[in-house]
Image (spheres, rainbow, N blue to C red):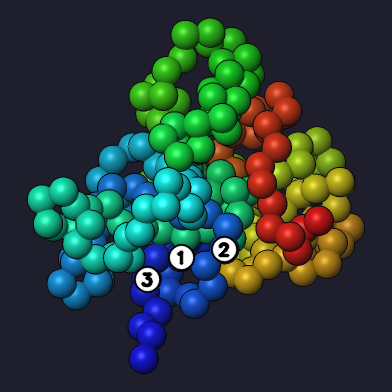
Amino acid sequence: MTVTLQNRITPFGDIVTNPARGLFTGNRGILHDAATRRLGRRRWTTKAWICCALDYKGQRRDVMGANGHDGKAGWTELFFLDEATALAAGHRPCFACRREAAERFRTLWRAAHGAPEAGVREIDAILHLERLASGASRKPLSLIDLPGLPDGAMVASGNDAWLIAGRMARPWAFDGYAPARPLGALAAKPLFLLTPPSTVKVLRQGYRPALHQSAQ
């Protein structure tokens, strides 16, 4: 019997149990016990929250097993529906397995923030202050803010996450997005921004996250 592990990431940044995998993996450091394949109490051990390719140089990992060079846990594999989900949760592209995307993200970050020398540690430190899952406060939105958000940004209407694309909104779920709806459909509940504000600036500069096929 296949056991569903607690390693799926929501746009809110929570790590939950769900059988859907999605398009990307990633990590926040070592969070699990390899013997039990269960998470410990910590939800990150590093500020470098990354979004990785599912396939890299044919490497095979025992998910939430003992993958470290020392025979211990190794980093904890987390899974995202798509890159927009990962960005909303506060992750950024990995410089090892997604070098091209990571370089573009950093270049556009520097342009968006007027910081031509910004390095990955600086980026991670700023993102860490803005991640809901690491304790950042919610940034309230109103309906008039939504048309100004770039494609690929994500917002919350109450407890529901929505992808903004083409001046429409798509409800998020672990296995894909529901059909697009007008932005006004989000008005019934309090609105707030999910994607970190610094990442929203990068999206405005032209970074286009890889989206699940249900959003095409």
Quadrant (top left, top right, bottom left, bottom right) of the N terminus: bottom left
Count of labels in the image: 3
Visible in this render: residue 7?
yes
Mark toward the start of the polypeptide (2 vs 1): 1
Label 2 close to label 1 by CB (< 8 Å): yes
Q: Residue visible at 12% across and 57% down?
A: 71
What is the spatial separation of the Cα atoms under label 1 and label 3, in whole angstroms?
A: 6 Å
Q: Which residue is mark 3?
A: 6
Residue 113 falls in image quadrant: top right
Q: Is residue 162 above or below residue 193?
A: below
Mark toward the start of the polypeptide (2 vs 3): 3
Q: Secondary structure at mark 3?
A: strand
Residue 124, image x, y percentages:
40, 31
Q: Is residue 61 left or right of residue 197?
A: left
Q: Nearer the viewer, mark 2 or mark 1?
A: 2
Q: Which mark is residue 22?
A: 2
Residue 53, image x, y percentages:
50, 48
Q: Is residue 185 left or right of residue 36?
A: right
Residue 84, image x, y percentages:
63, 48
Amino acid at pointer 3: Gln
Amino acid at pointer 1: Arg
Q: Residues within 10 Å of mark 1 (few under 14, many from 20)?
A: many
Q: Residues within 10 Å of mark 2 (few under 14, many from 20)?
A: some
What is the spatial separation of the Cα atoms under label 2 and label 1, in whole angstroms?
A: 9 Å
| Foreground of the two, 142 or 200 | 200
